Image: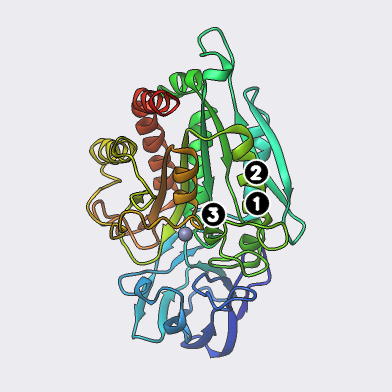
Amino acid sequence: MIINSQFDSGNIIVKSADTPQDIRLEIRPDNQSEFLQWFHFRVSNVAGVSLKMTIENAGDAAYVDGWPGYKARASYDRETWFMVDTSFDGQNLIIEHGCESDTVWFAYFAPFSMDRHFDLVAWAGQSPIAKNVVLGKTLDGQDLDMIVIDRQDENSVAAEKKLNCWLIARQHPGESMAEWWMEGVLNTLLDESHPITNELLEQCRFYIVPNMNPDGSYRGHLRTNAAGANLNREWANPTMENSPEVYLVRQKMHEMGVDFHMDVHGDEAIPHNFIAGYEAINGLDPDHQALFDKFEQHLATSTPEFQAEAGYPKAQPNSSDMKKCTDYTAGTFKCLAMTLEMPFKDHDNNHDPVLGWSPVRCGGLAQDCLASLLSMLPDIKAYKAKISG
Ligand SMILES: [Zn+2]
């Protein structure tokens, strides 16, 4: 039996593995930080073997509430990730599985590798309406990719009237569901026969950053970049030394403008899809808030994969936190902005007992979100006209 995590997004420390029924593991914290929760490793030479693996530092994880009701994901082919028996005793996370193949892969959630990211970006770049832009380099020297989708034809509104729609994902690299969501976005927007795509592309230009944190993704981090920075606390004062990912994207937002923004995440504890908004921003205009409420209601009524009851508690009015992306973009650009959270557990409103919340469903929710954006375009334009006087 061999346990290994020496690969893209791998994370596990083997404390001891004397027998398959007593494997002792720990999750390695993010570099220069104490955040830990993401794990990803393979166990080999185990066909027909029953494994019992104990992650001994699960009780020290960033979100201990993430463990009750959670089930680890496993895969034989690295395509289909299914849930396996998992329990939590307050400190140890215990994963048990009878292996049906020589090698089994285990992860906190279906991984989205940097290789798959490159495949996605390269594929998107072949579309005549998409353009690949590298915004700059990360601290580990990786490229920060953006995809611009902008179609100009006889039905399109004039270039200067197009709405600038920003979609960014994986500020927190362990929230791999966010990039599965991005795959769904690109599959939809680059399929010009898709019923919602045509009208969206007539009126909108899309700026898409499918992975805000390539370094954290490759290193197998939960929450931070190579320097230990939590990117979703960097928006007020990003620097090229500490958070070039945010610095570069924020700079481009100011250059191009923002009329709509989604920042896509995963939530460890809450077993629902939900969005969080900008009710805290200082001097909030009720008409601005109404855009968020209407989008949320549209999405909740159009798909069983979304709901508007469970989520984060509402923040106090006038308690804006510009370090966070959604408050920053909503407060700065007066646009409809939101944080989308998807679960590591399952979406309890619509259970899947085998796969739980899964990559395919992330892609489906992305389509639903784009349909809600389409329904909101008249409201977004009306509000933009109001505030520009
Ligand atoms: Zn997050």
Q: Which numbered disc, 1 or 3, marks the residue that appears first in the sequence?
A: 3
Q: CA distance from mark 2 to mark 3?
A: 18 Å
Q: Is residue 77 above or below residue 224?
A: above
Q: Tags 1 and 2 in contact by the CB under 8 Å rule?
A: yes
Residue at mark 3 = 170
Q: Position of residue 97 (x, y in %)?
A: 42, 75
Q: Secondary structure at mark 2?
A: helix
> Where residue 389 sits: x, y (%)?
42, 23
At which x and y percent is residue 137?
A: 75, 52
SS for callout 1: helix
**Residue placed most toward the observer, 25 or 152:** 152
Q: Nearer the viewer, residue 229 or 140?
A: 229
Label 1: few (<14), some (14–19) or many (≥20) C-alpha neighbours in 10 Å: many
- Is 370 situated above or below 282? above
**Badge 2 amino acid:** Gln
Query: Disc 1 versus disc 2: distance between alpha carbons?
Result: 6 Å
Report how far apart the C-alphas of labels 1 and 3 lie in the structure.
Answer: 15 Å
Q: Quadrant of the N terminus?
A: bottom right
- Mark 1, residue position: 247
Instruction: Give neighbour class at mark 3: few <14, some 14-19, many 20+ (Cα, 10 Å).
Output: many
Q: Residue at x 45, y 26 (%)?
A: 388
With 101 as the anchor, is 273 left or right in this view?
A: left
Looking at the rendered structure, the kind of residue marked 1 is Tyr
Q: How is the image coloured?
A: rainbow
Q: Of the residues under marks 2 and 3, which one precedes in the sequence?
A: 3
Amino acid carrying label 3: it is Arg
Question: On the image, numbered disc 2 is attached to which residue?
Answer: 251
Tag 3 secondary structure: loop
Residue that appears at 53% across and 61% down: 233
